[in-house]
Image (cartoon, rainbow, N blue to C red):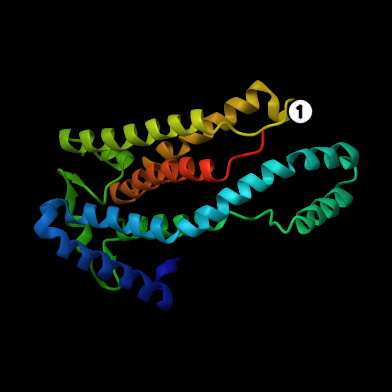
Amino acid sequence: MDTFAFPPLTLLLDGAYNALLSLSTLLEPLADTAASAMAVILVTLLVRCALIPVGVSQAKAEQMRARLAPKMRDLQKRLGKDRERLQRETMALYRDEQASPLAGCLPLLVQAAVVGTLYTLFLRPQIAGHANELLTHELFGAPLGTSLLHALGSGGLDLPTGLVWGAVLLIIIVIADITRRAFRPQVPAEGPLASPGMLSLMNGLHYLTAVFATFVPLAAALYLVVTVTWTLVQRALLRRRYPLPV
């Protein structure tokens, strides 16, 4: 079943296609053949700018969770076997603190929607019944509509494509490593989360973006490059503004 055959989604995708194509046309005098890639980067920056207030809320939520962590651990020790009462007491704790356990989830939902849209725009040969012109666009010779895995599987990994993808993955991995070192997870000194295996797993999650990037078209991978870089810088600035309790 084609989800985008549903009329409202077809109109939404066609609107996104026309907007991105128009932006690419405007950028051609500056970026030439890389205009579409530049348009994707610009859209990413606009999305991230729009999410700055939510990023502030996310930083406050992280500070709040760190502040409530001792109380949460106390509840788990006292009520660990009574799951229903533990859930009630946890929700009451968040309510008393005027906080939400789901705070900070909106950026993830918005970014998932943007990546999904870019993935679809640079994957479908047709958009709303007309040919998808975006599939003909490139970045330094690397097709924006081709994923790394597809290029490897189809024998289309030439030198320009390999260099572009190498740069994309290198940036994502370096940013992930800096993030892992700068923002170590807050875990209790004892318990299953403190085990070496669990800590290794949590550290490894930082690199999942690089793995995910190999499955999506280059255009969506560019979005990931910009957004992980933005996230690192924004998080560092907000951590200074909203430091975690010692």
Q: Secondary structure at mark 1?
A: loop
Q: Nearer the viewer, residue 240 or 59?
A: 240
In the rendered image, residue 114, in percent from the top left (x then y), is placed at 40, 58
Three-letter amino acid code at disc 1? Gly
Are there few (<14), some (14-19), or many (20+) residues within 10 Å of tag 1? few
Q: Is residue 41 above or below residue 3?
A: above
* Number of marks present in the image shown: 1
Q: Nearer the viewer, residue 169 or 125?
A: 169
Locate residue 128: give its quadrant.
bottom left
Q: Is residue 164 above or below residue 221?
A: above
Q: Residue at x 18, y 49 (%)?
A: 138
Locate residue 32: give its quadrant.
bottom left
Find disc 1 in the rendering and name its residue: 191
Q: Is residue 197 above or below residue 145?
A: above
- Residue 215 visible in the shown view: no
Q: In the image, is 180 to the left or to the right of 188?
A: left
- Residue 237 visible in the shown view: yes
Q: Nearer the viewer, residue 176 or 149?
A: 176
Figure quadrant of the N terminus: bottom left
Q: Nearer the viewer, residue 110 or 217?
A: 110
In the rendered image, residue 60, in percent from the top left (x then y), is placed at 60, 50
Q: In the image, is 180 to the left or to the right of 50?
A: right
> Seen from this angle, which residue lies furthest front?
241
Figure quadrant of the C terminus: top right
Locate residue 57: give its quadrant.
bottom right
Q: Residue at x 26, y 61 (%)?
A: 125
Q: Residue at x 31, y 47 (%)?
A: 222
Q: In the image, is 56 to the left or to the right of 102?
A: left
